[in-house]
Image: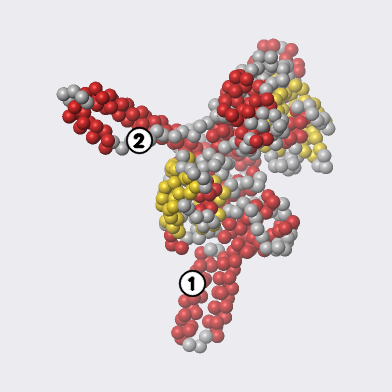
Amino acid sequence: MLLLSCTQLSRGFDAEPLFEDLAFELFSGQRVGLVGPNGVGKTTLMRILAGLDRPDTGDVRRHAGARVSLLCQQPEFAPGRTLFDEARNALQELISAHDDLVHTAESLAKATGEQEKKTLAERYDRLNEMLRFHDAYNVDHHVESVLDGLGFRKEDYDRSVDTFSGGQQSRLMLAKLLLAAPDVMLLDEPSNHLDIGATRWLEDYLVKQPEAMLIVSHDRYFLNKVVTKVFEMNSQRIESYPGNFEAYWRLRRERHEQALKAWEAQREYIEKQEEYIRRVHYGQLHKQAASRQKQLDRVERVERPVWIDTPRMHFGEVRRTGDIVLQVEELSKAYDRPLFADLTFTLKRGQRLGIMGPNGCGKTTLLRILLGQEKPDRGNVQQGHLVEFGYYDQHLKELDGAKTVMRAVWPHDDADANEQAMRDLLGRFGLTGNQVYQTVDKLSGGERSRAALAKLVADGVNVLILDEPTNHLDLWACDALEQALLDFDGTAIVVSHDRYFLNRVVDLLLVFEDTGKVQIIYGNYDMYERMRLLQDPAKTELPQQDLAKEDLRGAKPAKRKRQYPYRKVADLEADIAASETRLKDLEATLASPDLYREGGKVTEIMQAFEDAKVKLKELYDHWEESVELNG
């Protein structure tokens, strides 16, 4: 069902409009991601759709009386109301309908006239049907399930909303929107202020809802899991792509290449025609030239396609370290509670280690210990040969705000550095022209982030330690950073909550939990998800990796074909456990100083370690297939 449509929508605040002549439709069940560079007008468009702003031209139509609501970024609540009551208030329409049902039933019991009884009975049936459709007889249970999913504790239900933090209040605003279930949900950065558990819950919740959704988000993993279509806003226009985020990312390049070829072919044709007209215009063939000019005037010109500029980041060549960059043995640290205990792992040259976990779990503390800035309670960290750390602070305090960008990045001890070299370096990170002469404190968060990354290159470090490097970057800068890390000759350690980033970049992952336990995953984020599901028998569904393959008309996707021979799930799980043990034994061998006294043995053990990782991944894939097909 068509719920909302826009025609010839334009809006601007300066001489240049943010967008113009936008037209699109939203149907029930559609989940659409809205992406585009910062400043193109995504939030403005959402406010117009919600009726909180007016377009300069054009029209927004709500069909069939559709209710449209925007997730507010500035929470507003009635003073003194409790968490549970505030959340329950989102269902006030249903609660009022239930009260009306009770009142109608009482009136029906007292009615004497036949017409009055008939009218009241019809009203009772309509109300009862509506309440059943919205599952309104389980209101309190529904409120509890949403609050629980978004990370609220039952002991918080009776607390006054004013006592919650800003992030918690934002989560409550999201809870209220989900409970209200408008026909069209406008979700602006819905996963902000959510930890990974709550984000997973929200992803699963949204894909089961029948409402239409338009979602602005920088969380690419979230978009990949949830959306079935993507709108890209750029150059004052909007373009639609079917499928999830990965499908969009692939299709946009294909479309651009096709459009560029069409533009180049037309340009070549026009240039040839214009050259012919110039040559014969004053000769005997001038009538043919005039005819061709008329044909040329009727040609509808193809506009040159616009490609969103992506910084060409790369970290350059660095000095080679020893084969082992960090050897961490039985590391423990606690403050008022244990952060981690008996943490042991080996980081080899060229590896990219990811660290993830909830706030306050000890991630930054571990970084400080690895850098030698803090002492562990127990255990030790041994740095490898010729290791040079470079630290990217998520708060971007490494750059002097009073200096110009060029001087803030300029290396202190590089005699070969010069202004042109610094301009070239900053240009690789998307900082060009007069930007290099601005003071750092005048830069946006994204620009400052890219300057901090450029400084790591200027310092020539061979081990990058990056604390939440994607926080201030848009989708295109994130993609450039990921590619730069994949091409980096050195070693990288990244702390991040960005699952898409971790999935693409890392090959070793530490997952911190509230209990003080740290899981070591020999792979990326998807590998962790598989292991998490394997460890939890209650979870029978694996995460969907490619929503783009889902039939958008609602048909179930075809059953996958076997790639591996039939084996019992229990047998595979036993092999996985044995393979994980083998991997840990090999890692312990690599951590032993005795190994490095036998030169030829090192290469043999390292090869066995890599082979064991490949075998473990195959076992996970085989297990996943068997879980789905053996039944």
Q: Nearer the viewer, mark 1 or mark 2?
A: 2
Name the residue rendered at 61%, 46% in the picture.
191
Q: Secondary structure at mark 1?
A: helix
Crowding at mark 1 (Cα within 10 Å: few <14, some 14-19, many 20+): few
User: Which one is nearer the viewer's eye here, 123 or 623?
Assistant: 123
- Relative image position of residue 72 (x, y in whole percent): 60, 54
Name the residue rendered at 19%, 27% in the picture.
286
The CA distance from mark 1 to mark 2 is 55 Å
Name the residue rendered at 61%, 33% in the picture.
447
- Relative image position of residue 320 (x, y in whole percent): 66, 16
**Which label sits on residue 302?**
2
Crowding at mark 2 (Cα within 10 Å: few <14, some 14-19, many 20+): some
Q: Amino acid at mark 1?
A: Arg
The image quadrant of residue 341 is top right
Name the residue rendered at 42%, 47% in the picture.
21
| Residue 512 seen in the current view | yes
| Residue 605 seen in the current view | no
Q: Which residue is mark 1?
A: 126
Q: Quadrant location of the N terminus?
A: bottom left
User: Which one is nearer the viewer's eye here, 445 or 1?
Assistant: 445
User: Which one is nearer the viewer's eye here, 498 or 377?
Assistant: 498
Q: Secondary structure at mark 2?
A: loop
* Residue 383 as seen in the image, left or right of residue 96: right
Q: Is residue 597 above or below residue 435?
A: above
